[in-house]
Image (spheres, grey):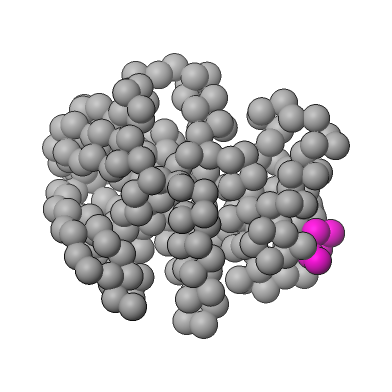
C-alpha cells in the first residue's frame, strides 16, 4: 500500500519557486487501479516520480508498505525500484542496439539473475504481451505499439508488485491505444498489481473506477462507475 502524507515538491526556476505538488495526501491500496489525470504541467508526472522513487519530495513522506521512500539511501532505493516497481514511459525508452529480448533482460541484470534464466524469463514476458515471435527484432523493426509492448514486458519481467505508467499510450494512434490499454488492464487483473496510470486522455480516465485529478499541484480523488 502507498501512503503519501503532506507531500510537497518545490522547484526553483530562476528567481521563481514552483510547487509541482502541494501538501498531497493520498492512499493507494494494494491491487488498486488509479488513473491520474490533469493538465500539462499540473504535477502528474511529478507524482509518478515520487511513487516510483525516481525523485524525493521537498517535504512529506511517500510510504510503500510502511517504508518511507523519501528517507531511503540511494542504494536501498535502487533495490526497491529493481525488485518491486515496474515503470512504463510514453517514449518506450528502449535501447536501439538491443533486441526485444535483450531489452527486457536489462530489467533483470540488477537482480543478479543468471543469463540463461534472464533469457527464459524475457521470452516468457514477451510472449505474455503477444510478442513471442519478435524476440530477436530491434526496436527499429517494430511498430510503436509493439515497442510499447516490449516496454511493458520489461516492466513486468521482474514480477513487481507495483506498475506505474506515464502516458503509456500518448504516442500511439487510437486503435493501438485501445489495444495497449486493454493489455495493461488484463495484466493488472491477472497479476494483482497495484497499477497507477498517468494520462491526459479523458477516454482512459472514463474506464477507471478511481481517478486522481491534479491541478496546480493539488490532488482530488473521486470514485466512479467505469464506462464500458
Residue 122 x, y percent position in the rendering: 74, 48
The stretch drawn in magenta includes residue 135: yes
Residue drawn at (74%, 44%) of the image: 121
Is residue 190 at all visible to an observer of this figure? yes
> Can residue 138 be seen in this snapshot?
no
The magenta segment is 133-137
Q: Is residue 129 above or below residue 69?
A: below
Q: Nearer the viewer, residue 16 or 29?
A: 29
Task: From the viewer's perspective, tell me whether residue 6 is left or right of residue 193.
Answer: left
Q: In this image, 41 relative to 49: left or right?
A: left
Asked whether 55 falls inside the magenta stretch, the response is: no
Q: Residue at x 28, y 70 (%)?
A: 226
Q: Identify the residue shown where x is 70% and y is 41%.
A: 106
Image quarter of the N terminus: top left
Q: Is residue 124 above or below residue 131?
A: above
- Residue 63 sits above or below residue 208 on the image: above
Amino acid at each position: 500500500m502507498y501512503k503519501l502524507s503532506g507531500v510537497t515538491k518545490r522547484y526553483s526556476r530562476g528567481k521563481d519557486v514552483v510547487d509541482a505538488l502541494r501538501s498531497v495526501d493520498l492512499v493507494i491500496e494494494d491491487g488498486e487501479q488509479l488513473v491520474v489525470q490533469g493538465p500539462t504541467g499540473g504535477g502528474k508526472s511529478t507524482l509518478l516520480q515520487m511513487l516510483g522513487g525516481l525523485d524525493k519530495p521537498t517535504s512529506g513522506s511517500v510510504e510503500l508498505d510502511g517504508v518511507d521512500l523519501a528517507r531511503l539511501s540511494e542504494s536501498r532505493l535502487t533495490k526497491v525500484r529493481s525488485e518491486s516497481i515496474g515503470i512504463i514511459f510514453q517514449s518506450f525508452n528502449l535501447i536501439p542496439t538491443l533486441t526485444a529480448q535483450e531489452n527486457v533482460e536489462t530489467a533483470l541484470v540488477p537482480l543478479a539473475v543468471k543469463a540463461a534464466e534472464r533469457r527464459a524469463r524475457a521470452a516468457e514476458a514477451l510472449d505474455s504481451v503477444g510478442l513471442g515471435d519478435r524476440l530477436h527484432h530491434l526496436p527499429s523493426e517494430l511498430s510503436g505499439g509493439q515497442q510499447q509492448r516490449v516496454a511493458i514486458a520489461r516492466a513486468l519481467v521482474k514480477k513487481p508488485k507495483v506498475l506505474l505508467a506515464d502516458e503509456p499510450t500518448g504516442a500511439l494512434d487510437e486503435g493501438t491505444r485501445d489495444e495497449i490499454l486493454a493489455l495493461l488492464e488484463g495484466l493488472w487483473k491477472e497479476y494483482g498489481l497495484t497499477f497507477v496510470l498517468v494520462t491526459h486522455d479523458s477516454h482512459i480516465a472514463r474506464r477507471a473506477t478511481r481517478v486522481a485529478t491534479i491541478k496546480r499541484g493539488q490532488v482530488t480523488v473521486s470514485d466512479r462507475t467505469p464506462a464500458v
